[in-house]
Image (cartoon, rainbow, N blue to C red):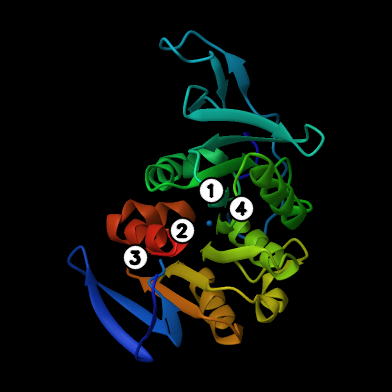
């Protein structure tokens, strides 16, 4: 197995909109133009696939997880005492750390990471080495992205990664905003449900209406959040980064993370 995975405006308490011809329920108090890990089962990632292969001219030949290829705009990094591996894309002064879901790796975030980089962000997507100390790993990724040149840093996580980024955001006052896609309230002792009331930055919760129990967790954490917040519930049962298959969901997440 690979490594584990703006404007501020007032909104009415309940509003229905259309995304790509489908209804989306958006529940918000105060919101930005805002726009994920499996369940709570355990698991440990195997070694990250790092290799050297023949690549296009200008590339270094280094690859990570068979999806990230180092070149002029993509840099493979090893950090936190070489315990963590990731890829940095883009060169913006503002950054985003992307945390993956269970039974996945950074590849699940890579297409969206490229969208963020094209929007002027410096992005670090990384591999969790296990299901332990997830919040610590997120904070190590934040420190690495700062070393790479980013200043203001946002967090986004899918499912297990969503739990991790919420807890990390409650522990680091220098995070600019945080988004959770299908993040459970609890994952292997990591309690996002208890951490959310301590988060002091704009927060976005995204879940699919039929993705139980994660949609219920998203609603509960939204209610307990005490900062600018938004809950986006979309039709269907997509989980984690699969939610980004809907381009409009991706657009809203992009707008949120870039603060536009």
Residue 92, compared with residue 53, is above or below; it is below
The residue that disc 1 covers is 93
Q: Earlier in the sequence, mark 4 or mark 1?
A: 1
Provide the residue designation for mark 3.
Answer: 236
Sequence-first disc among 2 and 4: 4
Is disc 2 surrounded by few (<14), some (14 to 19) or many (20+) residues within 10 Å?
many
User: Does the image show residue 94?
Assistant: yes
Q: Residues within 10 Å of mark 4 (few under 14, many from 20)?
A: many
Front of the two marks 2 and 1: 1
Q: Mark 2 and mark 1: span between their CA atoms? A: 30 Å
Q: Nearer the observer, disc 2 or disc 4?
A: 4
Disc on the earlier residue, 3 or 1: 1
Q: Secondary structure at mark 4?
A: loop
Instruction: Please tell me whether mark 4 or mark 3 is closer to you in this view.
Output: 4
Question: Quick check: marks 4 and 1 in contact, CB under 8 Å?
Answer: yes
* C-alpha gap between disc 2 and disc 3: 9 Å
Whether the residues at callouts 4 and 3 have beta carbons within 8 Å, the answer is no
How far is disc 3 from disc 1 in space, using C-alphas?
36 Å
- Which mark is on residue 239? 2
- Image quarter of residue 47: top right
Residue annotated with mark 4: 151
Answer left or right for 207 relative to 194.
left
- Decide which of 45, 226 is in the foreground and name it: 226
Q: Position of residue 86 (x, y in %)?
A: 62, 36
The dot on residue 231 is none
Q: Is residue 249 left or right of residue 28?
A: left
């Amino acid at each position: 197995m690979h490594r584990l995975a703006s404007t501020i405006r007032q909104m009415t308490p309940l509003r229905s909109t259309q995304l790509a011809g489908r209804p989306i329920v958006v529940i918000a108090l105060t919101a930005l133009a805002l726009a994920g890990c499996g369940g709570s089962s355990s698991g440990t990632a195997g070694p990250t696939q790092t290799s050297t292969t023949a690549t296009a001219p200008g590339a270094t030949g280094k690859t990570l997880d068979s999806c990230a290829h180092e070149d002029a705009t993509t840099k493979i990094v090893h950090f936190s005492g070489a315990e963590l591996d990731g890829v940095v894309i883009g060169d913006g002064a503002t950054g985003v750390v992307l945390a993956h879901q269970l039974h996945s790796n950074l590849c699940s975030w890579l297409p969206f990471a490229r969208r963020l980089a094209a929007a002027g962000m410096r992005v670090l997507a990384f591999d969790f080495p296990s299901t332990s100390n997830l919040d610590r790993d997120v904070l190590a990724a934040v420190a690495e992205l700062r070393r790479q040149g980013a200043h203001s840093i946002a967090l986004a996580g899918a499912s297990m990664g969503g739990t991790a980024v919420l807890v990390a955001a409650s522990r680091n006052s220098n995070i600019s905003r945080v988004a959770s896609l299908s993040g459970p309230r609890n994952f292997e002792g990591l309690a996002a449900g208890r951490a959310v009331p301590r988060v002091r930055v704009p927060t976005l919760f995204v879940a699919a209406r039929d993705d139980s129990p994660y949609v219920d967790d998203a609603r509960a954490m939204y209610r307990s959040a005490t900062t600018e917040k938004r809950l986006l519930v979309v039709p269907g049962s997509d989980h984690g980064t699969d939610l980004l298959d809907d381009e409009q969901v991706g657009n809203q997440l992009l707008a949120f993370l870039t603060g536009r």
